[in-house]
Amino acid sequence: MNGNAIGVGVDLVEVSRARAMLADKGAHVFDRLLTPAEAEYCRSRPDPAEHVAVRLAAKEAVYKALQGSEAARGIGWRDIEVTRAPDGRPDVVLSGLAAKRAKEMRVGRVLLSLSHTHEAAVAVAILSTG
């Protein structure tokens, strides 16, 4: 990793929680918590709940890594988008308050690691200057 680590976040989401949210709120979960591209990807998977869970964990991990100012507390779910790099690695696109906070922190790169089973999803985010 080039650059210095300037923030770290980790989060764990139980897949059963994501499954219950989808059963209770349905499309509202996709519309409120995920970007259209994320929702489309999750809906295309055999078990959308696993993929929703890992994206929520990723968003929360990035959110935690970006904290440190009052304004950062207002970062929204859709200000952090989980994407895939051309080589298949998870990647992050920041917008809105998340992008503003990353610029303030001089973030050059967000490194993201994701893992999930049928029971749980975990994400680690590291903010780097380079």
Image: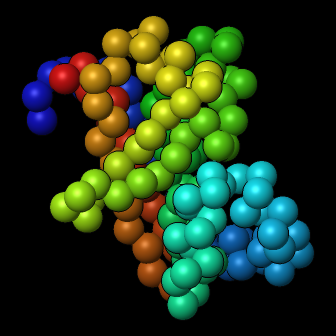
Q: Is residue 3 above or below residue 8?
A: above
Residue reaching furthest to the right: 24
Quadrant of res 18:
bottom right
With respect to residue 109, does 72 lie above or below? above
Residue 13 seen in this snapshot: no
Q: Is residue 120 left or right of residue 24?
A: left
Q: Is residue 92 visible?
A: yes
Residue that appears at 71% across and 71% down: 17
Instruction: Identify the image's colour scheme: rainbow, by chain, secondary structure or one colour.
Output: rainbow
Query: Which residue does the image show at 35% across and 49% down from the upper left?
Result: 91
Work out which residue is located at the far left of the displayed protein and give it.
2
Exactly how many numbered labels are in the figure? 0
Q: Please identify the quarter of the rendering in which residue 34 is found.
A: bottom right
Residue drawn where x is 25% and y is 64% of the image: 88
Tell me the quarter of the image containing the C terminus: top left
Q: Locate residue 125, reporting x and y percent.
A: 38, 42
Is the residue 102 above or below the residue 59 in the image?
above
Relative image position of residue 61 (x, y in whole percent): 49, 44
Q: Position of residue 46 (x, y in %)?
A: 54, 90
Q: Horizontally, is 28 left or right of 78 in the view?
A: right
- Which quadrant does the N terminus fall into? top left
Residue 95 vertical placement versus 115 (above, below)? above
Q: Nearer the viewer, residue 51 or 16?
A: 51
- List x then y, in percent, for residue 37: 56, 59
